[in-house]
Amino acid sequence: MIDRCCLPGSIMGPKLPDRPAVVARGDPAARRILEKALQETTRSEAMDARLNGLLAALPDADYQRWLPCLEQVDLPLGKSLYESGARLTHAYFPTTAIVSLLYVTEDGHSAELAVVGREGVVGIPLFMGGGSTPSRGVVQSAGHAYRLSAAALRAEFDRSGAAMQLLLRYTQALITQMTQTAVCNRHHSLDQQLCRWLLLSLDRLSGSEIIMTQELIANMLGVRREGVTEAALRLQRDGLIEYTRGHIHVLDRAGLERRTCECYQVVKLEYERLLPGTSAQG
């Protein structure tokens, strides 16, 4: 049985307004952009746990049982939710934040395995039995989330009810995203990879603007910065995006979908098939 850890005050709130994705890590210029963007975002963003698709998909009886144990947390830019090999203590259900699941090599290079936003949960090793993972979980886009303790999540999973089935279907969808990322990085052009990454990020946001430097995009994709610069310029020249000093504004989403490879649609359709009604796309 989960201990009831009631939180003060109401966690219910209105639907959030559109806001840009704020993404930066270890880059002073990008952090200045972040600070300005956050200043323009109202602090009155009241939260509702059901802004997360998985929590919204829980049967009402399960949701009401979880509610006292869900803790609202801020996820600042660059925050590490877990490190490689470390025991996970909480699962995180993002509402406005995006978390990158990254693998970092011994020589310091990194590549993104998957992104998790309002459609999912960070911390699948907790209910899959491993308790830890070789990857890292790092906040890519600042925002909010709800977290649930490891013990509480395992207790809910062990009930073998609707929550267990929901979490297992999400895990299959996440594995699909990881698989397609590996295929895409090996077989498809950098233009296609960049389009896929932009679309996956947009699906987890309310607006059409992403704030991120080309250097950080290169780190996510595991490629050279010069390659990202050239790819972004081609997309801008063709009228698909507008890129100015770390701001990427998507002008033609349909054009991006035509330009990308099949990997994006494979991932999108698998999420919709396994998790109907919890689509990441806003």
Image: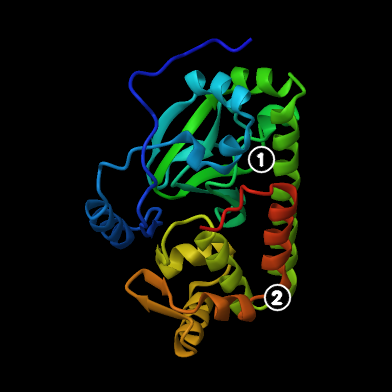
Q: Quadrant of residue 266?
A: bottom right
Q: Secondary structure at mark 2?
A: loop
248 or 222: which is nearer to us?
248
Query: Does 158 sit left or right of 111 as displayed?
Result: right
- Residue type beneath disc 1: Pro
- The residue that disc 1 covers is 134
10 or 268: nearer the eye? 10
Foreground: 47 or 135? 47
Q: Residues within 10 Å of mark 1 (few under 14, many from 20)?
A: few
Position in image of residue 260 (x %, y %): 64, 76
Asked if residue 131 shows in the view, the reply is no
Note whether 37 is above or below 79 in the view shown.
below
Residue position for label 2: 188
Q: Residue at x 49, y 72 (%)?
A: 225
Alpha carbon distance from label 1 to label 2: 26 Å
The disc at residue 202 is none
